[in-house]
Amino acid sequence: MTTPHLNVRNLSAGYGRARVLFDIDLTVHPGTIACVMGRNGVGKTTLLNTIAGLITPTTGTITHTGTDITTLAPHQRTRRGIAYAPQGHDTFAPLTVAENLHVAHQATRRNRPDLIDAALERFPRLKPLLGRKAGLLSGGQAQQLAIARALVTDPDLLILDEPTEGIQPNIVAEIETAITDTAAQGITVLLVEQYLDVALRLADTITVIDAGRVIHTGPRTELTHRSAHALMAI
């Protein structure tokens, strides 16, 4: 049996005394696209932040390729091959597109300039913008840069928080293609996605969270638009 790429067990986490996640179980297999869905405020971003090491869980374990990473710092997880593009087009606004990519690449301490070239091939819209400051990019361009910055760290697990939020439809299509191409190359993808149509097109598995608890998890084929909407309305 294949070892899960990411295995979250009995995970509880929150902010101070405010508990947000309750006994979360999540399994993501190698080379697949796993989507987490749910209404606003149910704990989706908290889950991703905890997996990325930005929040310390109160209980439970997080295992990456068979190794317990529950207590590792974010930079240690990055060096293990976990890349995170948080919600909100996370970039260094004063730096150019090229500088953003080089800074992210250098942080991994890997001498592989081909990773930058590969990221730009995945997002060709960024090529003519290499000299532009990231703070001057449109929302869609900034989101592509945020994902490209994650990819230049040479991840085996790419975590994306709402990568299509507020993005114009033509760039949403480009981001979808980049995600499916990334998975096709063997990189596992875990994302939070707010749009059901996008999730049903992209995901191999869908997990639905409500009030900090998993209320459904399984193959995408188990869900229809109607059943998914019913779960999110709980």
Image (spheres, rainbow, N blue to C red):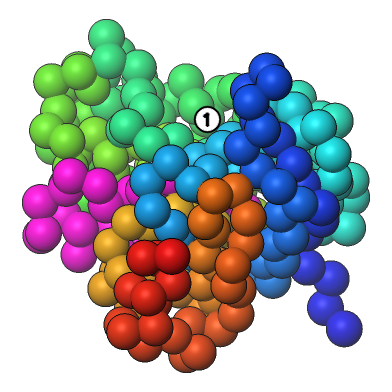
Residue at position x 60%, y 44% in the image: 47
Q: In the image, what residue type sits under mark 1?
A: His
Residue at position x 85%, y 46% in the image: 61
Residue 211: horizontal and vertical position, in percent? 54, 50
The C terminus: image quadrant: bottom left
Residue 32: horizontal and vertical position, in percent? 58, 72
Residue 55: horizontal and vertical position, in percent? 67, 27
* Residue 106 visible here: yes
Residue 218: horizontal and vertical position, in percent? 60, 80
Which of 71/113 is in front? 71
Residue 116 part of the magenta-drawn span: no
Say left or right for 104 vs 31: left
Residue at position x 77%, y 47% in the image: 11
Q: Is 119 above or below relative to 55?
A: below
Which of 6/177 is in front? 6
Name the secondary structure under disc 1. Answer: helix
The N terminus: image quadrant: bottom right
Q: Which residue lies under the disc numbered 1?
A: 105
Residue at position x 69%, y 21% in the image: 17
Q: Is 77 above or below relative to 232?
A: above
Q: Is 197 above or below relative to 104?
A: below
Image quadrant in which you'd find residue 153: top right
Say left or right for 227 vs 29: left
Image quadrant in which you'd find residue 137: top left
Which of 71/98 is in front? 71
Say left or right for 14 vs 2: left
Q: Which residues are magenta?
A: 157-181
Residue 166 part of the magenta-drawn span: yes
Say left or right for 137 vs 195: left
